[in-house]
């Protein structure tokens, strides 16, 4: 009886998901038959009122019906924002990538990089883990790496962008996130006595994520790993760097 109930539940779930998918495909058809400009006014009103799903429906309709219109680029920019606000990261990133590919010289290209970074960062957030105080520094950092790359692009190619200041602040936080991941992997190797792999992870943090709070731990891992490997010169060098930057560290005493 229990197995049957599970089968019924799964079948119902599949049917619901299929219905939702079919519904999504017909949402554009429900948008009134108006001019592009009139629909755009409706979409902006929906955005201003926080009705992001409604805005997505209208903007998608404009994008579908008037793909080469004079407001097509602005429609896509607003659609990226609407996807971000609605939490639809997959669609938001896909549209941002398409826009970057087709419009590499657009005057608002810095905005697209910025929004793509924000969308990737939202996939990293987990309210329940934050509330519970759970350390998940070992989770896959792919989204953070993508966000880091896009924010760095703004600072490199568009240093005068109005998004540059915020991009710089976010890069500091992302750098710490990526460094924590490398430290978590290094500690994993330490537990398994994979000394060379642990040392390499530590060195990577020192080379690519300085300055950050994780550099001290990285140097400690390098000292321990080189000691276990019998590499006295490398151990001494790592200790010297540790002493110069963290003179109160217990390994220096």
Image (cartoon, helix red, strand yellow):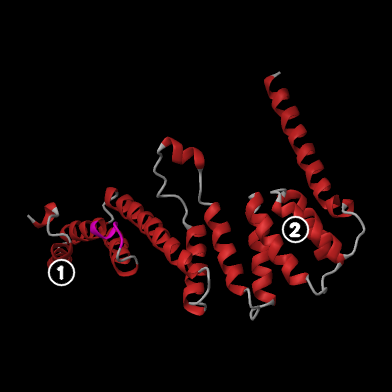
- What residue would you read off at disc 1? 237
| In the image, farthest residue toward the right | 33
Disc 2 crowd, CA 10 A, few/some/many (<14, 14-19, 20+): some
Q: Position of residue 3 (x, y in %)?
A: 69, 24
Q: Is residue 171 visible?
A: yes
Residue 203 falls left or right of residue 104: left
Residue 138 falls left or right of residue 84: left
Q: Position of residue 93 (x, y in %)?
A: 63, 61
Name the residue rendered at 60%, 69% in the picture. Answer: 111
Q: Which label is found at residue 44?
A: 2
| In the image, farthest residue toward the left | 253
- The residue tagged with tag 1: helix, strand or loop? helix
Q: Quadrant of the N terminus?
A: top right
Q: Which label is found at residue 93?
A: none
Q: Position of residue 79 (x, y in %)?
A: 71, 60
Q: Is residue 161 above or below residue 44?
A: below
Disc 1 crowd, CA 10 A, few/some/many (<14, 14-19, 20+): some
Residue bounds of the magenta highlight: 212-216
Main SS of the magenta part reads loop
- Does 77 lie within the magenta span? no
Q: Position of residue 123 (x, y in %)?
A: 55, 52
Quadrant of residue 177 within the rendered picture: bottom left
Name the residue rendered at 46%, 67% in the picture. Answer: 165
Mark closer to the observer (2, 1): 2
Name the residue rendered at 42%, 59% in the picture. Answer: 174
Q: Is residue 60 visible?
A: no
- The residue tagged with tag 2: helix, strand or loop? helix
């Amino acid at each position: 009886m229990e197995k049957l109930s599970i089968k019924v539940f799964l079948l119902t779930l599949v049917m619901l998901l299929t219905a939702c998918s079919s519904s999504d495909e017909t949402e554009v058809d429900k948008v009134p038959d108006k001019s592009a400009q009139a629909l755009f006014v409706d979409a902006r009103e929906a955005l201003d009122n926080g009705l992001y799903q409604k805005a997505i429906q209208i903007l998608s309709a404009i994008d579908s019906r008037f793909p080469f219109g004079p407001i097509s680029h602005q429609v896509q920019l607003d659609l990226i924002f609407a996807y971000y606000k609605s939490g639809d990261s997959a669609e938001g990133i896909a549209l941002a990538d398409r826009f970057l590919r087709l419009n590499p010289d657009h005057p608002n290209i810095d905005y697209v990089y910025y929004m793509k970074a924000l969308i990737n960062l939202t996939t990293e957030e987990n309210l329940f883990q934050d509330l519970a105080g759970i350390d998940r520094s070992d989770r896959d950092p792919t989204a953070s790496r993508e966000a880091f790359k896009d924010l760095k692009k703004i600072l490199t190619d568009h240093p005068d962008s109005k998004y540059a200041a915020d991009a710089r602040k976010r890069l500091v936080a992302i750098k710490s996130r990526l460094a924590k991941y490398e430290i978590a992997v290094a500690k994993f190797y330490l537990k398994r006595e994979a000394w060379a792999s642990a040392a390499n992870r530590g060195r990577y943090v020192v080379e690519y994520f300085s300055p950050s709070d994780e550099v001290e731990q990285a140097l400690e891992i390098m000292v321990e790993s080189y000691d276990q490997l019998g590499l006295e010169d490398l151990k001494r060098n790592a200790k010297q760097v540790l002493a110069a930057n963290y003179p109160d560290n217990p390994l220096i005493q």
